[in-house]
Image: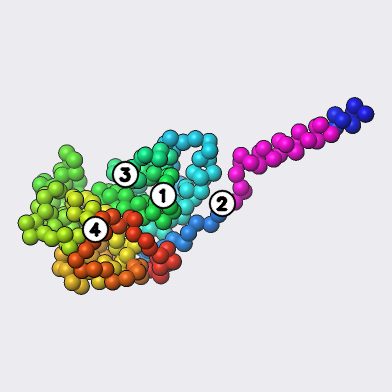
Amino acid sequence: MRIRVFCLFLALQLVSLALWAALFSGPKSLPKVLPVFQVAHTAAPKTSSSIAFEARSYQNAHQYLRQLQERQIEAFLAQLPAQHVQTVTRLVLDYNQKAHRGLAGGGTLILRAVNMTLKERQAVLIHELAHNVDYGFLVSSSGVESGFYDGTLPIYEGDPSLEFYRLSWVLPGQKHASSRPSDFVSGYAATNVFEDFAESYAYYILHNKNFRSLALKNAVLRAKYDFLKTRVFGGKTFDTGFFTPSIFTRPWDITVLDYDAEELLKG
């Protein structure tokens, strides 16, 4: 009798152990990510293995969420122009609820991993990627100093970004005297030259039809759109955008505007 009781006890322990392992190991396969978009480019796609993922303020409870988010980000970045993605070598997911939504520069991109929807986080990812594109893709490492600075680092005359900067800016924080709010895609874009580029980059990808519509009525925006199309995206455009935007009013922040992920596939 004692042997039968012992065997039953042992069987229950094995079942309990199996359930415990299944609970904390997460599912075998992760849910599919939202549709992502493709950009035709001559270079081979960036491989996810060349970006090092890290986590901040990470707890064991975030394990499954972190796995899912890394999968989503890898799939999303794999569809972007390879030269753009290659400007990022380190991507940090920050699980602090009070962290900045996004930060970028020097090959690093930081995203807050909580309290954002997937669509907003992808929009922030595009905005922050734009900073690395600006600093790491459109660059010149020597020459005559232009008068523009990234912090204390000079931006040289051979830097392609200067063509974009000088459409609205005399210096990084100083706009042309003739500059108007309607010359920018968002209020945040008008705060400094680097946010102007990043917001315009995100608007070009996520709301291209809106950008084109505004460009027909504003010469400065037309020049910014043309720069992105020819110098940054190699002629690639996107069939994205919901409506014809107002000529005079602008949102504050492109990354919180709604967009249709399905439209990105049509680009």
N-terminal of the two: label 3 or label 1? 3
Left or right of 156: which side holds 13? Answer: right
Vertical comparison of 223 with 119: above or below: below
Indicate which disc, 2 or 1, sits on the residue closer to the N terminus.
Answer: 2
Scheme by which the image is coloured: rainbow
Residue kind at label 4, given as amino acid type:
Ser
C-alpha gap between disc 2 and disc 4: 36 Å
Dot 1 falls on a residue whose secondary structure is loop
Contact between marks 4 and 1 (CB within 8 A): the answer is no
Point out the frontmost of discs 2 and 4: 4
Q: Residue at x 15, y 44 (%)?
A: 149
Q: Which quadrant does the C terminus fall into?
A: bottom left
| Residue 146 relative to residue 50: left or right | left
Q: Give me the residue at 10% from left, 47% from top.
A: 147
Residue named by callout 3: 103
The residue segment tinted magenta is 8-29
* Furthest residue toward left: 177
Judged by depth in the image, the label closer to the viewer, 2 or 1, is 1
Alpha-carbon span between mark 3 and mark 2: 27 Å
Which residue does the numbered mark 1 point to in the structure image? 116
The kind of secondary structure element at disc 2 is loop
Residue 253 image offset from top left, x and y in percent: 28, 55
Q: Is residue 7 magenta?
A: no
- Direction top: furthest residue: 2
Q: Position of residue 54 (x, y in %)?
A: 43, 39
Q: Nearer the viewer, residue 147 or 56?
A: 56
- Find numbered disc 4 in the image and state the secondary structure of the residue it sits on: loop
Amino acid found under the numbered disc labelled 3: Leu
Which residue is tagged 4? 186
